[in-house]
Image (cartoon, grey):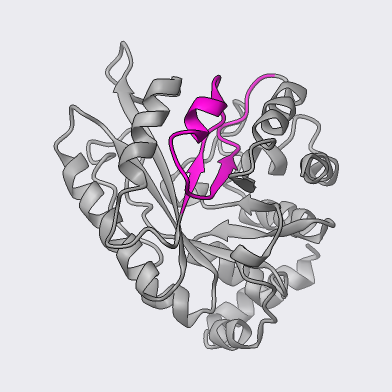
Amino acid sequence: MPDTMRARLVRTRATAPDAVCTAAANRPRGPELARRGRFLLIAADHPARASLTVRGRANAMADRVDLLDRLLVALSRPGVAGVLGTADILEDLLLLDALANKIVVGSMNRGGVPGTVFEIDDRFTAYDADTITAMRFDAGKMLLRIDPDDPATAGALERCSQAVSALAARQLVSMVEPFWVRRDAAGARVNDLSTDAVIRSVAVAQALGSRSAYTWLKLPVVDDMPRVLAATTLPVVLLGGDPHGDPDRTYAAWQRALTDESVRGLVVGRALLYPPDDDVAAAVDTAVGLL
């Protein structure tokens, strides 16, 4: 992003905030999710929960211009269908005219900041169904962490259920990202990525809300994906998660999971935006090739 572009973006935000709504109203939209083949979405809602570290690089996602640069590269690559983010990210991209004909998914509950005492009390602090509708976006995404030892889980379940119902009433897709949570030796909450735990989380997540017609599941790739995918008839997208280890092994795991007809695509953020060699275009092109 040239300095002149950043300056224009900052100036527009300060002096013409209505430009965001104008850009949203004028944005050309592509086909609905249900009418697309398999697709790749770039996830960029991590900073809203202060999740800034990537591959051991502290604060890798803290530089907003650098993050936008990486998103602009990713969204420009052939085969990238769209982006998932919070209002601060998506409105920057709208003002940069980067979302024409793209799928846009608004991230909804970002209140459960990792490492806090209120982590599981995951409030809806970002998008709501009314705003997603008004902005002419395609879906809302919510994180659902189920901690059997934390009573705040009940409230999180209720709020996610209400969001699913609100989106369905507007015929908008809910992307629900469920995790069963356990405590490690130090008492910190970690997502349980065992096959049985993921299946339990699927069972709960797919029943949320007064309707499931517009519910999709956003699931991690774990050891026995056939068993996980057998637990649901809902559309599934695969999440990239916190990248670690050999990228080629990650790509191979995604490719194996993509053989199931219920898997509609990939929703990947840090693994593609911050690859080990920093070649965002090459990483994105590799992921598109898996589809």
Question: Seen in the image, is 125 located left or right of residue 16?
Answer: left
* Magenta run includes residue 235: yes
User: Extreme top residue here?
Assistant: 185
User: What residue range appears in magenta?
Assistant: 216-245
Q: Residue at x 59, y 87 (%)?
A: 25
**Total residue callouts:** 0
Q: Residue at x 31, y 49 (%)?
A: 207
- Residue 43 visible (yes or no): yes
Q: Residue at x 63, y 59 (%)?
A: 83
Which quadrant of the rendered structure holds the N terminus?
bottom right
Q: Give percent across and percent down for residue 113.
A: 35, 43
From the viewer's perspective, is residue 76 above or below residue 289? Answer: below
Question: Seen in the image, is 231 located left or right of residue 240?
Answer: left
Q: Quadrant of residue 23?
A: bottom right
Of residue 260 and residue 122, the one placed in the foreground of this image is 260
Q: Give percent across and percent down for residue 69.
A: 74, 56
Of residue 285 and residue 33, the one placed in the foreground of this image is 33
Of residue 24 and residue 289, the one placed in the foreground of this image is 289
Q: Give percent across and percent down for residue 268.
A: 63, 44
Which quadrant of the rendered structure holds the C terminus?
top right
